[in-house]
Image (cartoon, grey):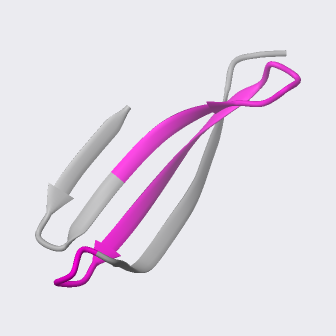
Amino acid sequence: MRLIEVGDEVVVSYELRRPDGSGGRNTEILTFDRDDRIVRTEVYFGWNVGGA
């Protein structure tokens, strides 16, 4: 849904679909070092989206 790069961070928001048909949205903030390795991850579990 969303991919934003700011300095050494990337913000990713996405929708997911569960086996029962329900879904949700999450956002992650990934921080990278100078060698492009992930050094920190923040995960924000979002809200339910439609479905069963």
The image quarter in which residue 25 lies: top right
Taking depth in this image into account, of 34 and 45 the one nearest to the observer is 34
Residue at 78% x, 24% y is 22
The magenta stretch spans residue 14: yes
x then y, percent, for residue 41: 46, 73
Left or right relative to 7: residue 22: right
Residue placed furthest toward the front = 35
**Up-down relation of residue 32 to residue 44 (above or below):** below
The image quarter in which residue 44 lies: bottom right
The image quarter in which residue 35 lies: bottom left
**Up-down relation of residue 12 to residue 31 (above or below):** above
The magenta stretch spans residue 28: yes
**Looking at the rendering, in which quadrant would you find the C terminus?**
top right
Residue at 80% x, 19% y is 21
**Looking at the rendering, in which quadrant would you find the N terminus?**
top left
Taking depth in this image into account, of 47 and 35 the one nearest to the observer is 35
Residue placed furthest toward the left = 7
Residue at 24% x, 68% y is 9
Taking depth in this image into account, of 48 and 1 the one nearest to the observer is 1
x then y, percent, for residue 43: 53, 64
x then y, percent, for residue 18: 78, 30
Principal secondary structure, stretch drawn in magenta: strand
x then y, percent, for residue 2: 32, 38
Q: In the image, which residues are magenta?
A: 12-36
Residue at 76% x, 16% y is 51
The mark total stands at 0
